[in-house]
Amino acid sequence: MKIACLPGDGIGAEVAAAARDVLSVLVPELEVEEHVFGGAAILARGTPLPDETLAACRDADAVLLGAVGLPQYDAADVRPEQGLIGLRKALDVYANLRPARQKPIDLIVVRELVGGLYYGPKGTRDDGTVFDTLEYHPSQVQRIAHRAFALARRRHGQVTSVDKANVLETSRMWRRVVNEVAADYADVRLEHMLVDTAAMQLVTAPERFDVILTENTFGDILSDEASAVTGGLGLAASASLGDDGPGIFEPVHGSAPDIAGRGVANPAAMLRSAALMLEHGLDLPAEAEKLSAAVDSAIDRAPTKDLGGNATTHEMVAAVLIALER
């Protein structure tokens, strides 16, 4: 099994190294190759997604990604984040899974990842007006809805489809197609919820949710909110999956350049992303469960500063390895 590891920028390199250390113990037969990506790739190659990096990702069984983003490129024409959006589109990883759990909360956001506002036509008109276009085809909604319902069937049997059907044409189509897909899953309960209501419910009653199904922009925002409710971005993992080819597995946090190189980054989100990779990308559910349990143990025994403790990145990794030995 071959893994393309893209450390990226800032603390991405540190948490990627943590994941490699743990995976080498848990699944020593994995072949892990690092490739330049994001801001580091702009500095080295002039583009955030070099052709050779993309080729390596296509050839891998899974892609494990650290973080992208460097402050000097925030307003540049060529930005690290363009590499991430391009990689998602190239691999057609349309289903983004964002778990969020903390007793009694156990929910997962299923976000459509390669359509909508981020990928629609955009530009500037002669009068200075700037526009971004939100558009979806029914087939895009169908495939992400099937993912959500199939996942709910293996969990607690409930899908909450989030839209803005009282305002947006795309949301009205979204709701219609989701209803059509729901007919194939009689054992799964479906409810529709407007996005503003969903945002409030995530704060006031997050335990009521099981699977939240939504489009790209809403999913981007709601999944970060769910992460904040369940402990912060330092714990938030994600899996981005397609129908064929490798998935992308990455922590939700950014590159955090303010703490890069200090050895204090929380590696839990990256390690949880590695667990998602073992489960969804490499079909190693037992190893995934072991890693998830070890990370939970390390969070309790050696919390980093963002979790109220004082453990370093290395100390949390050591706690994970000790838990795996047990």
Image: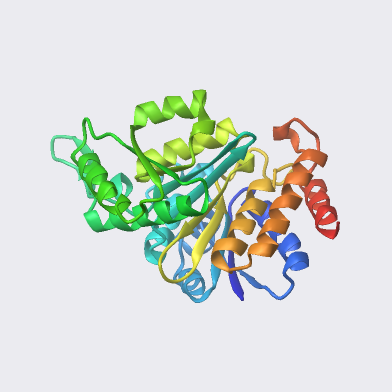
Compared with residue 62, is residue 111 higher up or lower down, i.e. above or below? above
Task: Pinpoint residue 261: horizontal percent, then vertical percent.
Answer: 71, 46
- Give the left or right position of residue 24, taking residue 145 as reference: right
Q: How many marks?
A: 0
Task: Pinpoint residue 229: horizontal percent, then vertical percent.
Answer: 57, 31
Relative to the observer, which residue lies in front, 64 or 200?
Answer: 200
Task: Pinpoint residue 130: horizontal percent, then vertical percent.
Answer: 22, 38
Task: Pinpoint residue 19: horizontal percent, then vertical percent.
Answer: 69, 58
**Quarter of the figure that contains the C terminus:** bottom right
Looking at this rendering, what residue extends furthest in the left direction? 126
**Quarter of the figure that contains the N terminus:** bottom right
Relative to the observer, which residue lies in front, 61 or 119?
Answer: 61
Residue 69 appears in the rendering = no
Relative to the observer, which residue lies in front, 18 or 152?
Answer: 152
Q: Residue at x 47, y 73 (%)?
A: 58
Q: Residue at x 59, y 43 (%)?
A: 236
Q: Residue at x 35, y 52 (%)?
A: 145
- Give the left or right position of residue 210, taking residue 146 as reference: right
Looking at this rendering, what residue extends furthest in the front direction? 187
Relative to the observer, which residue lies in front, 292 or 122?
Answer: 292
Compared with residue 321, is residue 298 higher up or lower down, i.e. above or below? above
Q: Residue at x 45, y 27 (%)?
A: 201
